[in-house]
Image (cartoon, rainbow, N blue to C red):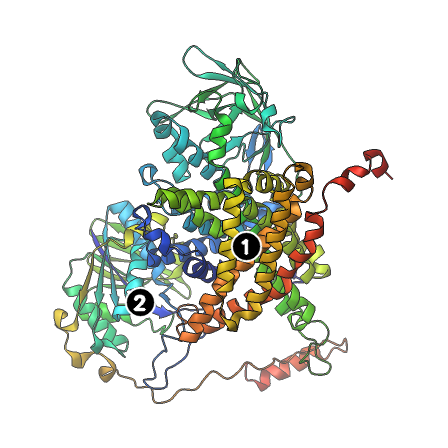
């Protein structure tokens, strides 16, 4: 069984992010880059498939050369190989552009299962996994909070607001997982040491046969024209209960004024 | 119930950036990776290891600290039960493999420098000191065994100790044999099958029994029937809790039992056991390590490593308490600060005296950390440098620094956790905030693994006489050369540092001049150690400040950031100008001699 786990480099979720005014993208110098935390759940699920089914797992990253430590980081959880797609033409891609690159990269690989995180912590679009499935014309099983593979069938519990649906598909399939699916382990000391000697292939758009017109900022469906810093946090309103019995009414008035109710 | 106090007291953030800075600029890792033995410890790999070890300590271990203190370890049905949260934390520790970092590759270890492994230990200890003691003892057992055990013994026990699947203990102390280990009376009698029957009682056995591992390998000092008296007649034995079959599976339960656990001031979750060997038969089965009557010499091979490990506990616990004090000082609002609006309460960190306490903590922690890392660095070079002359010199340096690391860092552990309590005001004395636990936990470290008084005697009695005194004089010369080389923009550090080195030179000369009156020297040994360590710590901070200043001047601030580097310079200056001058006040006590100590009869000391 072969599994691919696409991962993303994101600005540290807890860090204070800045936008570079020149190209209106995230200023990567201003904040530490990390492996997207949602990917850790997909990686953990892949490691369990290794343990249960002897799956061979390849991690896939689309990003600049400087993102290579993120691939090694993902490998430190015990995955087998890395594949990085690096090309200046990819910069500024939107979700669909990114999905086109991933889909082409997947086409060139053999796989039974692709395990995405359901969203990245920077963009939070949740679009890429389904777009990739659409582009490859493969079954799309999103928001998995439980996953089982039996022969050539994958069953997931697809989370939604009222609970979950049990969804089944044949392999190969594209799955996105949510954080409820497992509790990721920590990379082990030996895993970190082994990661540096795992095979890592690097491919360009040309290697994958992706047309530069289909990706990058030029192909993005949305353009950012302007941005503003987040306004400073203002002091909140405190309604004091002075015992006169009017506090609840004051609170209700305030909520009505702010259109919360 | 709503918390009166908003900080999540379980929060600990491993100071990965501080550790990296020391490894790059104060005790350079590059000097170790240049050696064949450590060529694999590349900086990027070490960065990755420290990052993940820090995350593991912060996320998986730190949350168990409070539970451990509140629940403590208990004896249930003749066995020790650790706090509920410990089992999962320990399993995670074994799975992640953090115990293997320093051990030889042939037993499944990472063969990393102690300099790197000790950073991992510092993080785990900050996260939970009581938890960290189990792995620390196991590490000590491996260290001792790898140097003295037979191949068969090594293969039987060491790989599972390296992985952490089994735990190790050290059994030295008996009621009448504390600092005076030579007074051990536990007996070992040869049996027909080449093993030994061990009988006797041991006390203060850290993690003597617990439920974290399937087996526990006790290393026990005992006396053979024909052994000479004192330290020359002590032998070392392996006594496993469960005997190990030839195929590696666990066999019969050995005749070793936990009698009781001590009720202690701190480290409640660390079981401190009274152990009985051979209570229910003719003795516990033990296996002799090496030759008979070599137990003390064998123990000494791990002494530097173990004492440095305890010194590191002082750094680690002070760091944990400091982080909590810093958080509280930014959160708690009282009184008006220099920039307060009328009627507005300032965060207490705005008050000068609170700043003084926080900077004292931060600067002292950094000095003690640098000393402990420098000590590990010297041990690594002493073991692995290519040039035998370098090995010898670095081993002597490690021998000199070890009592400084152990005693100074653990004294600071107590003093700085006390300051962290003080920052909290009344809430610091209330257990609810959790900071009091660090103060209680810190108090053991100046006592065990050779009391700090013993460390001071070791310094003046054993280490100063190296090469007839030439070694320490050469070292002081090195300190002076490095301080003199500080540039004029760091004159505020250089001048007080040179004055302190002078003072250290003066009192060191006094000690050499009085070596014929050892009791006069011993009377001032503790303040002398303090003086020595404070000077060394200041010198190491100055080394870091010089590097930080250079990088700021060059505009080469990545990956640390300009603010971080500027703070290194400021903290080194704060230490040099406000803490280091305390050494001048120690001279009277160092050079007073013993006369007054003995001028008063014990009876006259009573009220």
Residue B10, visible in the rendered structure: no
CA distance for labels 2 and 1 = 46 Å
Chain under numbered label 2: A
Residue drawn at x 69%, y 40% as measured from the top left: B520
Residue B18 location in percent, x, y? 48, 61
Q: Nearer the viewer, residue A120 or B214?
A: B214
- Which residue is the extreme one toward the bottom? A225
Q: Residues within 10 Å of mark 2 (few under 14, many from 20)?
A: many
For label 2, the residue is A8
Chain under numbered label 1: B
Residue A162 location in percent, x, y? 42, 64
Residue drawn at x 57%, y 56% as measured from the top left: B535
Residue drawn at x 81%, y 34% as measured from the top left: B602
Residue A215 as seen in the image, left or right of residue B403? left
Would you place residue B265 above or below residue B537 in this image? Answer: above
Residue A86 as seen in the image, left or right of residue B557? left
Q: Residues within 10 Å of mark 1 (few under 14, many from 20)?
A: many
Residue drawn at x 52%, y 32% as measured from the top left: B170
Q: Is the same chain shared between marks 2 and 1? A: no
Residue B88, visible in the rendered structure: yes
For label 1, the residue is B536
- Which residue is the extreme one toward the front? B513
Q: Nearer the viewer, residue B244 or B525?
A: B525
């Amino acid at each position: 069984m072969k599994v691919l786990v696409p991962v993303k480099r994101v600005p540290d979720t807890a860090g204070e992010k800045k936008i570079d005014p020149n190209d209106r993208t995230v200023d990567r110098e201003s904040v530490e880059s990390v492996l997207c935390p949602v990917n850790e759940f997909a990686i953990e699920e892949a490691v369990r498939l290794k343990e249960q089914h002897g799956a061979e797992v390849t991690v896939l990253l689309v990003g600049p050369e400087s993102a290579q430590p993120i691939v090694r980081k993902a490998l430190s959880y015990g995955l087998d190989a890395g594949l990085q797609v690096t090309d200046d033409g990819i910069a500024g891609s939107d979700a669909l552009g990114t999905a086109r690159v991933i889909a082409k990269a997947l086409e060139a690989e053999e796989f039974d299962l692709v395990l995405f995180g359901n969203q990245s912590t920077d963009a939070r679009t949740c679009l890429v996994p389904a777009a990739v499935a659409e582009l490859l014309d493969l079954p799309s099983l999103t928001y998995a909070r439980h996953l089982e593979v039996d022969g050539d069938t994958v069953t997931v519990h697809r989370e939604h607001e009222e609970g979950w649906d049990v969804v089944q598909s044949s392999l190969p399939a594209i799955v996105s997982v949510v954080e409820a699916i497992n509790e990721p382990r920590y990379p082990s000391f030996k895993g970190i040491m082994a990661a540096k000697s795992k095979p890592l292939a690097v491919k360009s758009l040309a290697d994958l046969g992706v047309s530069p017109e289909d990706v990058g900022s030029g192909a993005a469906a949305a353009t950012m024209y302007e941005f503003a810093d987040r306004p400073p946090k203002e002091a909140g309103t405190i309604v004091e209960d002075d015992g006169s019995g009017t506090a609840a009414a004051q609170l209700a008035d305030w909520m009505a004024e702010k259109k919360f109710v | 119930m709503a918390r009166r106090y908003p900080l999540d007291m379980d929060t600990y953030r491993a100071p990965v950036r501080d550790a990296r800075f020391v490894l790059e600029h104060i005790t350079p890792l590059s000097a170790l990776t240049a050696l064949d033995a450590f060529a694999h410890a590349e900086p990027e790999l070490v960065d990755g290891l420290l990052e993940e070890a820090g995350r593991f300590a912060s996320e998986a271990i730190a949350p168990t600290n409070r539970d451990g203190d509140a629940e403590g370890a208990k004896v249930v049905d003749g066995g020790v039960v650790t706090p509920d949260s410990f089992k999962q934390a320990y399993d995670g520790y074994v799975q992640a493999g953090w115990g293997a970092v320093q051990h030889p590759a042939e037993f499944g270890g990472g063969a990393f420098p102690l300099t790197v492994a000790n950073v991992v230990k510092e993080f785990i200890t900050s996260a939970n000191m009581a938890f960290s003691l189990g792995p620390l003892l196991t590490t000590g057992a491996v260290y001792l065994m790898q140097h003295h055990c037979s191949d068969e013994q090594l293969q039987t026990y060491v790989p599972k100790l390296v992985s952490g699947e089994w735990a190790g203990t050290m059994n030295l102390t008996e009621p009448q044999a504390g600092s005076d280990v030579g007074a051990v009376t536990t007996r070992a009698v040869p049996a027909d099958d080449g093993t030994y029957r061990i009988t006797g009682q041991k006390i203060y056995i850290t993690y003597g029994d617990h439920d974290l591992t399937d087996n526990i390998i006790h290393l026990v000092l005992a006396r053979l029937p024909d052994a000479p008296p004192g330290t020359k007649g002590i032998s070392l034995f392996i006594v496993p809790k469960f005997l190990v079959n030839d195929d590696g599976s666990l066999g019969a339960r050995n005749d070793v039992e936990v009698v009781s656990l001590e009720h202690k001031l701190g480290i409640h979750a660390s079981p401190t056991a009274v152990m009985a060997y051979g209570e229910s038969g003719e003795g516990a089965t033990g296996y002799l390590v090496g030759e008979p009557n070599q137990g003390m010499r064998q123990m000494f091979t791990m002494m530097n490593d173990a004492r440095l490990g305890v010194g590191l506990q002082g750094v680690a616990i002070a760091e944990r308490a400091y982080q909590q004090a810093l958080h509280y000082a930014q959160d708690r609002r009282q009184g008006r600060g220099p920039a307060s609006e009328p009627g507005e309460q300032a965060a207490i960190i705005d008050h000068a005296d609170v700043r003084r306490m926080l900077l004292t903590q931060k600067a002292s922690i950094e000095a003690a950390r640098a000393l402990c890392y420098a000590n590990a660095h010297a041990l690594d070079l002493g073991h692995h440098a290519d040039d035998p002359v370098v090995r010898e010199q670095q081993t002597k340096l490690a021998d000199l620094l070890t009592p400084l690391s152990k005693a100074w860092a653990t004294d600071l552990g107590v003093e700085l956790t006390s300051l962290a309590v003080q920052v909290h005001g009344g809430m610091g004395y209330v257990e609810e905030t959790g900071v009091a636990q660090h103060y209680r936990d810190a108090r053991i470290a100046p006592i065990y693994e050779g009391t700090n008084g013993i460390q001071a005697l070791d310094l003046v009695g054993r280490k100063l006489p190296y090469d007839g005194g030439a070694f320490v004089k050469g070292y002081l010369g090195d300190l002076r050369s490095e301080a003199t080389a500080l540039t004029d923009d760091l004159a505020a550090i250089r001048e007080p540092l040179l004055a302190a080195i002078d003072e250290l030179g003066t009192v060191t000369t006094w000690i050499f001049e009085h070596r014929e009156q050892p009791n006069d020297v011993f009377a001032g040994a503790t303040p002398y150690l303090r003086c020595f360590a404070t000077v060394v710590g200041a010198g190491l901070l100055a080394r870091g400040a010089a590097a930080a200043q250079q990088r700021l001047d060059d505009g080469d601030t990545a990956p640390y950031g300009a603010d971080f580097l500027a703070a290194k310079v400021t903290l080194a200056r704060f230490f040099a100008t406000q803490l280091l001058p305390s050494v001048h006040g120690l001279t009277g006590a160092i050079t007073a001699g013993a006369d007054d100590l003995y001028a008063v009869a014990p009876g006259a000391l009573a009220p």
